[in-house]
């Protein structure tokens, strides 16, 4: 009996020793780990050749391991770096979309303005000759102010256009009545009759409506592209909390320490880690989607009634029509002004005929569509906007889908649910996948997230999107909003501010390398006002000479 017991003990002991010996010989080598570790660019100095006891490990399982404390620290930093690269790589397309489309739209619009100004200058020079060149700054100022508005200047479009027509009236009125001397006060009185007399017909009213809503839509749209670009760039630079770094190291590199460097994390395991690390980014998604929807609405306007190309290209023709209307009504306009403002004093020179003979030697001839200059963007506005809309639609729900993109099967996670790393060994991952967003991370089994402390940078970007969305919605309705700097005590102009909670210009990004929207330009306005007043006595010769010569031209035509 005793002999039999001793035989059983000896057999069990040999069996245990045999199993132990086989297990140790199988798991003892760290050659694969050394090779993979070295491939990451790390030195193999002090990297064990065989497994060692793992009591020193702070993140990975503390059984027998191929990792020293120094290795675990380096892999910790490597996990953080790789995660940053993964987010940057996964967000590259959406960031590139806003960068490239902002550049294209901005380039298209500015060249459209430049070409329109060149077209007007060329045609008016041919048609009106010296008189136009002597008064060309009136038109140059118009395009300068339009461009300043688009590039972020605090320009009131309606007031600027009213000022343009008032200056044009002053110039033409003096030319039509060159036998009289007009003081600045008298000319100011003349400008007050602009609305009542309608010397330019219905052109100013129609052009004001078209230009205002088209420019509001275009400027707001390009600002939206810039805001999208800036938000995406900032959010892609993630603020990685220590708990996230710990979870990333455990997921990506603890397999190294267990002697399985080629083992990828289980798919659901990857989802929980990424949703924990990107919880704040996912919270951006709701406001991001509203912002994209608002961008698409304004894009629809740009394709339809607010098409800036349809407004800017024929602006020279419309202004010429207004000039000719003034010429046709010159006698009635002068009579009514004399009645309202008083009889001016004679200049003692009589009516000057200087330059009349060569002003309208040819009828005003606009370019044909084929002859018009093309823009550097190489496409019409409709095609450009269609392209931008397609890219915007693709960017919806981007931030909530980011963990899915990073954990895509074959990219980071393992498709085989049994042959994957489950946080402690090879095998199936059983915990459920948590939903995205900060509040849902309270039950995340992999990342310890403090749901009471949202990321400040992300909250700022949410506010930036909210402010921009509000501007876009107003632009869709043809309304403009100026967000003043906080130093301006919250003052605003336009149809309303929509920003009552102390919003600052930090959240508004200008469409080009331009001044910040809402910057104080009181000095510029004062200078512009003074310049406008001094010019009222000068270059007006052009248009009123035009008005004088058109009747002669018309009479000659009738005699023929």
Image: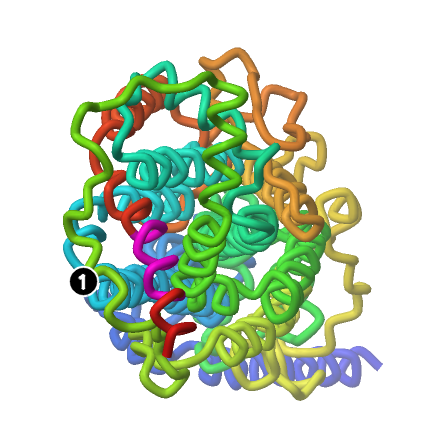
Residue 547 forms part of the magenta stretch: yes
Q: Which residues are magenta?
A: 546-554
Q: Position of residue 175 (x, y in %)?
A: 29, 40
Q: Is residue 93 above or below residue 452?
A: below
Residue 519: % across, % down: 39, 26
Where 156 sits versus 221, above or below?
above
Q: Is residue 544 left or right of residue 319?
A: left
- Front residue of 206/339: it is 339
Q: Nearer the viewer, residue 389 or 530?
A: 530
Quarter of the rendering containing residue 359: bottom left
Q: Residue furthest right?
A: 1
Q: Quadrant of the C terminus?
A: bottom left
Which residue has dot 1 on it? 358
Q: Residue furthest front?
A: 559
Q: Residue at x 61, y 83 (%)?
A: 409
Q: Residues within 10 Å of mark 1 (few under 14, many from 20)?
A: some
Q: Residue 498, located in which quarter of the rendered image? A: top right
Q: Is residue 550 magenta?
A: yes
Give percent across and percent down for residue 442: 77, 43
Looking at the image, can residue 58 be seen?
no
């Amino acid at each position: 009996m005793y002999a039999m017991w001793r035989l059983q003990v000896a057999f069990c002991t040999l069996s245990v020793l045999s199993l132990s010996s086989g297990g140790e010989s199988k798991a003892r080598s760290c050659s694969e780990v050394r090779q993979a570790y070295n491939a990451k660019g790390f030195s193999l100095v002090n990297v064990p050749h065989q497994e060692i006891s793992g009591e020193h490990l702070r993140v990975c399982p503390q059984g027998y391991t191929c990792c020293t404390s120094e290795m675990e620290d380096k892999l910790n930093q490597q996990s953080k770096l790789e995660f940053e690269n993964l987010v940057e790589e996964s967000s590259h397309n959406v960031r590139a979309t806003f960068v490239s489309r902002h550049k294209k739209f901005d380039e298209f619009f500015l060249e459209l303005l430049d070409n329109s100004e060149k077209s007007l200058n060329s045609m008016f020079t041919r048609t009106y000759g010296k008189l136009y060149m002597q008064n060309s700054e009136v038109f140059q100022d118009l395009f300068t102010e339009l461009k300043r508005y688009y590039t972020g200047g605090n320009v009131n479009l309606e007031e600027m256009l009213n000022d343009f027509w008032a200056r044009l009236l002053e110039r033409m009125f003096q030319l039509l009545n060159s036998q009289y001397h007009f003081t600045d006060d008298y000319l100011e009185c003349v400008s007050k009759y602009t609305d009542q007399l309608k010397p330019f017909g219905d052109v100013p009213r129609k052009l004001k409506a078209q230009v205002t809503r088209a420019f509001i839509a275009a400027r707001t749209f390009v600002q939206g592209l810039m805001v999208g670009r800036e938000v995406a760039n900032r959010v892609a630079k993630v603020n990685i909390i220590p708990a996230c770094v710990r979870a990333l190291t455990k997921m990506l590199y603890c397999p190294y320490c267990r002697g399985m460097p080629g083992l990828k994390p289980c798919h659901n395991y990857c989802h929980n880690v990424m949703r924990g690390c990107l919880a704040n980014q996912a919270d951006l998604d709701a406001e991001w989607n509203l912002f994209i929807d608002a961008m698409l609405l304004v894009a629809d306007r740009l394709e339809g009634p607010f098409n800036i190309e349809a407004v800017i290209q024929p602006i020279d023709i419309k202004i010429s029509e207004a000039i000719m209307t003034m010429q046709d009504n010159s006698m009635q306009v002068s009579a009514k002004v004399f009645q309202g403002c008083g009889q001016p004093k004679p200049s003692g020179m009589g009516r000057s005929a200087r330059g009349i003979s060569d002003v309208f030697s040819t009828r005003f001839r606009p370019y044909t569509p084929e002859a018009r200059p093309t823009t550097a963007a190489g496409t019409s506005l409709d095609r450009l906007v269609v392209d931008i809309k397609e890219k915007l639609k693709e960017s919806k729900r981007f931030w909530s889908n980011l963990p899915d993109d990073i954990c895509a099967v074959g990219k980071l996670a393992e498709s085989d649910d049994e042959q994957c790393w489950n946080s402690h060994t090879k095998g199936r991952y059983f915990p459920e996948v948590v939903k995205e967003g900060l509040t849902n991370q309270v039950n995340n089994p992999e990342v310890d997230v403090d749901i009471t402390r949202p990321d400040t940078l992300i909250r700022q970007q949410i506010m930036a999107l909210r402010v921009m969305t509000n501007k876009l919605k107003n632009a869709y309705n043809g309304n403009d909003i100026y967000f003043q700097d906080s130093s301006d005590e919250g003052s605003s102009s336009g149809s309303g501010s929509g920003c009552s909670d102390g919003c600052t210009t930090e959240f508004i990004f200008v469409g080009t390398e331009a001044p910040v929207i809402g910057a104080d330009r009181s000095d510029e306005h004062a200078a512009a006002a003074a310049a406008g007043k001094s010019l009222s006595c000068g270059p007006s010769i052009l248009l009123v000479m035009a008005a004088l010569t058109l009747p002669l031209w018309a009479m000659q035509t009738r005699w023929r």
